[in-house]
Image: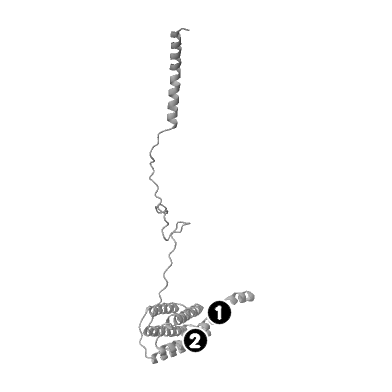
Amino acid sequence: MTITQGLRTTALVALITLPFIQCGGEQKAAEAPPTMPSAEPPTDQTADPDAGTAQTPQGIDVATGAAEPSTPPPEKRETLNDAQIAAITDAANTAEIAQAEVAKAKSKDAGVRSFASMMITHHTEAKHKQAQLKLKTEESGVSTTMHADADATLDALKTDSGKAFDQAYISAQIAGHQKVLDTINDKLLPNVKDANLKAYLEEIKPTVEQHLKRAKQLQESFDSKSSSAPAQSKHAG
């Protein structure tokens, strides 16, 4: 081989090798891209750990998402003075006498008529004893409601007759005396200041209990008669 042929061979090998060297360099450059700055803000280690956490509003049930029922405020008891207490007992006595007078005029039942006579006697005596105390009277929410209930009961009784009247009258006596008894225990005795008025309340309380018991007995007798009537009719047939 001549010197000229050797130079040509060396140059040809160099030209063939050069693309491979360039490709290898480009590949290495692609595998190692330059480091880019992060777009995320740096983490503040002192930040509030709860920051960004959704807070549950107060009054919302976490499980259902429904609004939790709020607790109603405790019922405020009405404070009554002695004059208001006297007005309440007077209203109760007046209502019982008025209803009993209607019962005596309309009822044919011996038990109902006897009960009505007892109402007139006892409540008239109670009104007389209260009058002797010479107490002032003053209306309150309790006495106003009592007057309205008494008027409604009286109007209803005037439209009934026969056994329907007897049932309605005795039912009204049970409800009315229970309400008066509860009022004495819950509102009158806890608020009364006058010693004589307190003694009067303690005196009439057992009478109210007696009336309530008797009215319930009459109601039971009505129920017993009603339940036995169909059986007697079937036996007679």
**Secondary structure type for disc 1:** helix
Left or right for 231, reference 40: right
Q: Is residue 131 visible?
A: yes
Q: Position of residue 43 (x, y in %)?
A: 40, 47
Please name whichever residue, 115 or 123, is drawn nearer the observer in this view of the structure.
123
* Numbered circle sitting on residue 177: none
Question: What amino acid type should be assigned to the residue bearing mark 2?
Answer: Pro
Q: For the view shown, which residue lies furthest in the bottom direction?
A: 132
Q: Position of residue 45 (x, y in %)?
A: 41, 50
**Relative image position of residue 91 (x, y in whole percent):** 40, 83
Please give the residue where the numbered disc 2 appears in the rendered image.
206
Q: How many marks?
A: 2
> Upstream in the sequence, badge 1 or badge 2?
2
Q: Is disc 2 placed on a helix, strand or loop?
A: helix
Measure the alpha-carbon separation of dots 1 and 2: 21 Å
In the picture, measured across the screen, residue 115 lies left or right of residue 42, that is right
The amino acid type found where label 1 is placed reads Glu
Q: Residue at x 46, y 87 (%)?
A: 202
Find residue 220 and name its label: 1
10 Å neighbourhood of mark 1: few (<14), some, or many (≥20)? few
**Res 73 quadrant in image:** bottom left
| Position of residue 115 measured from the top left corner of the image (x, y, whole percent) | 50, 85
